Image (cartoon, coloured by chain):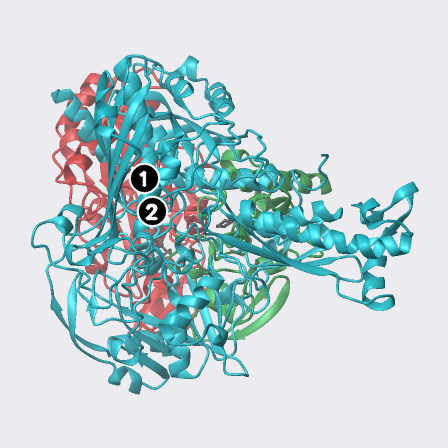
Chain colours: A green, B red, C cyan
Amino acid sequence: MIVEFTLNGEAVRWEMPPDTKLLDALRVQGLIGTKQGCREATCGACTVLLNGRAVFSCALLLAQAQGGTVETVEGLGSVSDPHPLQRALVDASAVQCGFCIPGVLMSAKGLLDQDPNPSEGAIRRALNGNLCRCTGYVKIIEGVTLAAEEMRRRV
Amino acid sequence: MRVTEYLYPESLEAALRLLAAPDTSPIAGGTVVSLEGARAPRLVDITRIGLDQVTLGQGELLIGAAVRAADLTLETLGASPEAMLIAEAAAGMATTPLRNAITVGGNLAYLCGWADLPVAALALDASIEVQQEGAAPQLRPATAWVAQHPRAALPKEALVTALRLPLKPGARGVAYHRFRASATENALVSVAVAVTVAEGICVEARVALGAVTPRPVRAEAVEAALIGGPLTSARIAQAVEALDVRVSPNFRMSPKARTRILAATTRRAILEASQRATGGQA
Amino acid sequence: MSLKVVGTSVRKVDGLALAAGGPLFVADEIPRHTLVGRALRSPHAHAEIVSIDVSAARALPGVYAALSHHDVPRVAITTAGQGAPEPSPYDTFILDKKVRYVGDPVALVAAETAEIAAAALKLIKVEYRPLPAILSIDAALAEGAPVIHDEPEAEMPIPVHYEPEKNICAFVDVASGDIEAAINAGDHVIDGTYEVHYAQHAPIEPHTCAGWLDQYGRLVLRTSTQVPFHARRITARALGLNVRQIRVIKPRVGGGFGTKQEVLLEPWVGALVLAAKRPVMIELDREEELVFSRTRHPQRVRMRTGYLADGALTGTYMEVHSNTGAYGSHGLTVMTNCGSKTLPLYRRGEVAFRGTTVYTNMPVAGAYRGYGGTQASFAQECQMDEIAQHLGVDPLALRQKLHIRQGEGSPAFAMLGEGKEGVEQIVQSCGLAECLKQGAEAIDWYGKRGKPGDGPIKRGIGMAALMQGSSIPEIDMASVTLKMNEDGSFNLMAGATDLGTGSDTVLAQIAAEVLGVSVNEMIVHSSDTDLTPFDVGAYASSTTYLSGEAARRCALKVAAQIAEVAAVELGCDAKAIHLEGGYAVGPEGRQISLARVGAISLYERNQHQIGATDSAISHSSPPPFAAHFVEVEVDTETGLVKVKKYVAAVDCGRAIHPALAEGQVEGSVANGIGYALTERFIFNEWGKVQNGNFGDYRIPSAEDMPELVTILVPTVEPTGPYGAKSVSEININGACPAIANAIYDAIGVRLRQTPFTPEVILDALDAKARG
Ligand SMILES: Cc1cc2nc3c(=O)[nH]c(=O)nc-3n(C[C@H](O)[C@H](O)[C@H](O)COP(=O)(O)OP(=O)(O)OC[C@H]3O[C@@H](n4cnc5c(N)ncnc54)[C@H](O)[C@@H]3O)c2cc1C
Ligand code: FES
Ligand code: FES
């Protein structure tokens, strides 16, 4: 089937079998920033934003994105022009192996888009689906807090 | 099962018509359909047909089947004891990204052992609105909903369209408690309580238990023991002694330990609901 | 010495690239038309394969290879990923005619898609003859027990006790002196047995390996490994190839914690690539990663200690029974580390150690962060509390009195090393006293201890003191290559493997410090067996200490070469030149930029490549130290234990990168808390793990973690680069004992077995109530 949606701000039109998972569709299309850690909706490495909300792309069909907007880590920023969240997580030394980080970033973006000044509890809750085995979350939470401050300063 | 067709009806009528065809089933949040596979090769997406509304009616709160778990908050549901119980049940479901996907209808229809909304629905005397092509909308009481799995009880072409909660008058208090060893795992025990107090006396009590039996059940013996007297902690503790639910086996914990935890969790949930009903006077 | 780069938390060199989601991991960048490799796994815990037929699978369209044990070389290897000769038995084959645990591989397929691969696995016909299964340490040692490794090839490549016919994978029995006399010289003797359970590393990226043949017919393996050079050697042995026929590339790795020291997928992928003549990738699924890769050795640790009325210890006998599961990977060395990474912590008088590692038909254990230290610290630190309690003294004070100090040795150091005798060692840096002091303050030890409160939810405070090592002395080796470019930048090529630990950054900092430049001038590449120099890899807490030392030495050589060139330009003696701020600075403020030096050396005069390779080996394994403190709540009605606050005070020498060092502490502590409370395998009666998924195997989420305070107590280790010691492993060891001790403080129940699940707490409370 053909699925049309907005991916990282650009209109795309992908033809794939109707039971293709969004995760697989993204990776086949070269958007490998979205990671696969379980395919069981339990690790968070595959988190993307669908219509502005964090969801697991392994627990979603591509077809569900029809007419909607999908944001992935690739749309957030790049090495030369990072998003404040990307920069803040690196500056907080929250990026260890980095495998969980794209998912963490998308969950954090989903949160900050709704709540620009979240409490620590709200950050932990927003990230509760994103398992990280390296950091113990301390620096990830610091990084998200830093980014929120920076983003508030910008607007 | 391989999916061959994915359909996007734009109205409830169109969706019902599509579902009436053979080999067709609904998809809502898609968390089950994507992870476990589809039950039919033709999928009908029911998230674009206006079922994502919350309506406050005459003495009733109507929550559309396509409302996401993440939206079951006091902000969207309005302030009422009934809303509070639903919000507490939804707040602890799964993880944030899953709550952003899971729908009310999917949670009720899939009715897995630890599903939270059916437990809350049971405690609130809720009804589940079901529609199918060529028939008038049906209201199924929550007690009937959990008595037999909807997959067996309902015709395949039936669609859950709403969860309807009666807003009861009086001094009401609710509480949703769950027990688990870590923050986001499936509950080992969940308890939903709604009590009504009049002149210091408990006049109505609903205690629903989840995750301890294949489908949620009411603790009727406990309810009976609560009604007719004040909700003191002594009476609550005594009422909980009447718990007679046989906890089914679960490889994560023995029935013995779970039975004990169930009692403690039930007592605490009733206590909190009572305090809320009486404004902390109990 | 004023340091400019070392000791600062510079931006991690790969941080932004990772945060941008670039194609950095194995699965992110694979050749076109790479096949999907998958394994068929045994449903039996112990069985002989009477017959196996893969022909139907092979005939399925889209299948390019289907292999059983008939199709692969029969060469016994160990997957342990250690130096050669390995201290682990050769008891594993690419595929075997016997299965030894539920999940043991029986066949491999490579197919165009995951669906076809799954269909192919279903077509493989296997006839098993089930054998009685051994599902406990005691069953393994019982008279007449079935023999798990009865194959004639099973052997131990080094001369140590190996007795597979009795299911004994390793046995060690050593003493520093007359241990019985020493123990009996005490006024009291305590004899306790402590048990720790299975757990898994749970890296978020599962083991992943892609392989293909290059234009010259060489086998290229791009793999998530901690040990590229060992992986190359072991894969060569398994496939009957020469080392030179294999190239191992380690891209970014999504966490390892020991499990990616195991050479699991590389021989399989190699065999499939050779059979299919096409690129193949195997990506373990989550159940395979959790249950069928490698796990922590469950153990029973008995400690018998004599002590005087004033608390002084007279002698300790530690006896370890370790369950290595179906294969003996790290079976010997994890067991010996139980003694060597704990016993030196206290002045103990005489010490003795006896360890037995057994085979069982259970998941395979291997290297896991903490590596024996985790298991035995639980025993040692619970026992310290028990002694204190018996004597009626403060457990913190008892540790303060007894712990090892700078300038002291321990008979345990020489008695026991890693799989062999140890190395005599004097502790040259020890910040433990300060760790104990600062940690106690941060948790409010004196204010909060012994105050459980009145309600059903009790509070408790507990602690543990810890040590580990830094590298394996006289065994480990690391190398670094540096070469200079004409813009004054440097390529730093390290065999050391950054798994997310930040070692690329740390090595860059050390080299940058020596060369007087910022980390931005360092272009780090790790690791590729064709391009980077040899390094044993990331294990044994060796990377900062040893690879860091190699980087320092290598940079010193390069600095000398730069000075030679600069001296000619500045007209002075090379010895008069020092490097600073990107310049070679000579007498009277004369200076020349490194960019000019680079350009001159490559294009202008006396042209040559400025560059060097140097190596470091270790002669000692200086222990880092730590004191952990924890505050818990125990719900006496539900048995739920909640950690409210955790303080880790750590002496890791000089932290080259303080924020990364803290990150290592925080990650370890989180993993330790998970191990103590929620991470466990739940077996059914025939030895199958029922919870091989993250839904039921619960590692901590952001909502589970308590307030976590990390305190780095700086010391300077004279043998380490810029005074550094290790930091990555030690901090996983504290949670089990500290939480057990806190539970005792809260509810007066002594738990000698992990984990502390609600059910365990309820049962223990019942037992206490019964008296
Ligand atoms: C890892 C994980 C953890 C979870 N934890 C919890 C938890 O703690 N508590 C909890 O309550 N839930 C939890 N869930 C959610 C629950 O198990 C289901 O996944 C979810 O409720 C399904 O909702 P959905 O909207 O995604 O349904 P879908 O996947 O869209 O559909 C599920 C099934 O219901 C049918 N269906 C969907 N909508 C309707 C409808 N309106 N009428 C009739 N049939 C319909 C579909 O045909 C399908 O068969 C968890 C899920 C996962 C994956
Ligand atoms: S891959 Fe989707 S949650 Fe793990
Ligand atoms: S940084 Fe490695 S899993 Fe999060």
Tell me what residue is drawn at x 66 percent, y 39 percent. Answer: C8
Q: Which residue is mark 2?
A: C334
CB of mark 1 near ligand 3 (< 8 Å): no
Tell me the amino acid under the disc marked 1: Gln
| Residue C147, position as x, y percentages in the image | 14, 59
| Residue C618, position as x, y percentages in the image | 51, 47
Which badge, 1 or 2, is on the more N-terminal residue? 2
Residue B180 got which mark? none
Q: Quadrant of the C terminus of chain C?
A: top left
Residue nearer the viewer, C441 or C87: C87
Whether C737 is drawn above or below C558: the answer is above
| Residue B231, position as x, y percentages in the image | 24, 19
User: Residue C449 appears in which quarter of the rendering?
Assistant: top left
Q: Chain of mark 1?
A: C
Q: Chain of mark 2?
A: C
Q: Dots 1 and 2: beta carbons under 8 Å?
A: yes
